[in-house]
Image: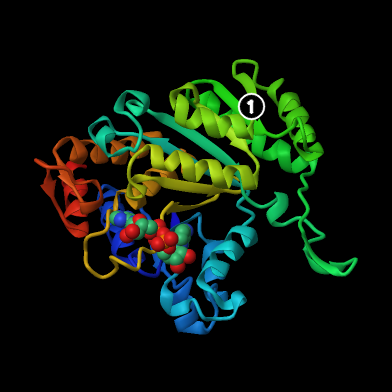
Amino acid sequence: MKLAVLPGDGIGPEIVAQAVKVLEVLNKDGMKIEMEHAPIGGAGYDAAKDPLPEATLKLARAADAVLLGAVGGPRYDALDRPLRPERGLLRIRKELNLFANLRPALLYPELAGASSLKPEVVAGLDIMIVRELTGDVYFGQPRGIEVRNGERVGFNTMIYSESEVRRVAHVAFGIAMKRGKKLCSVEKANVLECSELWKEVVAEVAKDYPEVELSSMYVDNAAMQLVRNPKQFDVIVTGNIFGDILSDQASMLSGSIGMLPSASLDENNKGMYEPIHGSAPDIAGKDIANPLATILSVAMMYRYTFADMATADRIENAVKKVIAQGYRTGDIYTDGCKKVSCSQMGDAVVAAM
Ligand code: NAD
């Protein structure tokens, strides 16, 4: 298996180094993972004046999967927009056609106190949000700002084709089949034609998955239900903009942004795996970042791209074990636990494996 490793900026290299330790354990056990590192984001700009250098894209295309740290930092904020680190990230997602973004929101029982909601509301939380990633109002044409009737107007186009909805719906139903067999499609069909079509197409796809219980919910209600009673959800499928907002909201249910992995998949389950957090420039270079989201991203890689559930379970169980043993980086630390650095947390996971 060929893996493109793109550490990126800020804490990216520190957290990715811990994930690489985990991969090295798997290699020692005979996995044969070939890893090649390349720059992206600000590091790409520094190396080749491009946040997604040609060589990095070539490597990512040739690889079976991509592991990414995070991109961005104040050093690059003054660059022209096309040269900014975040553009490299958007481009690689688009170039690799990674249309399905999977974001679990899972709460480890020992971390219930770290959530902003009452422990009884979030204890045992385990949701998967499937967000469409390459369409919707973020990419729809026409878009722009222009003068009409003597004043400026800004406009974007919310647009989905049947085929775009169908392919992400299949991914979501497939995931629901492997979990609790419940799927909630989130849209705004009472107001938007685009959502009306979304809802119809998802209902058509549902016929291929008779075992999955499908429901639909308006996005405003879904935002409310996610904080009122989040455990009612198993898998949620939604469009790009609704998913952007809801998945960030759901991530905070579980306490720390440093715990949550993500996957972005194409039609053949090739994927890019990355923590949901950014490059955290405020703590970069201090060896204090939480590497668990990145390590859990490797587990997702085994589950979704390599279809190796046993290895995915092995990594996830090792993370559960270090949490149960009381190891905590600063972001999830509470009194009485063992405070560890980023690299010590990586070592603890390796030991638990
Ligand atoms: P951020 O996610 O980097 O940080 C938000 C807060 O969470 C910070 O206080 C940070 O210290 C903390 N944090 C984040 N990850 C952590 C971890 N693993 N362990 C412990 N604490 C952690 O978001 P931001 O500060 O808004 O953005 C910083 C930079 O990251 C910006 O340049 C932004 O554009 C970029 N960004 C990149 C991505 C990505 O690469 N996918 C995502 C979001 C933001």
Residue in the image at 48% along x and 71% along y? 41
Please state which of residues 154 and 280 is positioned toward the viewer in this rendering: 154
Please state which of residues 76 and 346 is positioned toward the viewer in this rendering: 76
Please state which of residues 273 and 145 is positioned toward the viewer in this rendering: 145
In this rendering, does residue 175 appear at all?
no
In the picture shown, does residue 271 fall above or below 171? Answer: below
Q: Residue furthest right?
A: 149
Relative image position of residue 307 (x, y in whole percent): 47, 38
Please state which of residues 260 and 3 is positioned toward the viewer in this rendering: 260
Relative image position of residue 22 (x, y in whole percent): 27, 52
Local SS, label 1: strand
Residue underneath mark 1: 217
Colour scheme of this structure image? Answer: rainbow
Residue in the image at 48% along x and 45% along y? 248
State the count of labels: 1
Q: Residue furthest front?
A: 150
Mark 1 belongs to which amino acid?
Met
Relative image position of residue 342 (x, y in whole percent): 22, 58
Relative image position of residue 35 (x, y in whole percent): 39, 62
In the picture shown, does residue 286 fall above or below 32? Answer: below
In the picture shown, does residue 192 fall above or below 280? Answer: above
Asked if the beta carbon under badge 1 is closer than 8 A to the nearest atom of ligand 1, the reply is no
In the picture, measured across the screen, residue 303 lies left or right of residue 165, that is: left
Q: Quadrant of ligand 1?
A: bottom left
Q: Label 1: few (<14), some or many (≥20) within 10 Å? A: some
In this rendering, does residue 131 appear at all?
yes
Residue in the image at 36% along x and 28% along y? 122
Residue in the image at 81% along x and 37% along y? 193
Check the picture and name the quadrant holding the C terminus: top left
In the picture, measured across the screen, residue 68 lies left or right of residue 23, that is: right
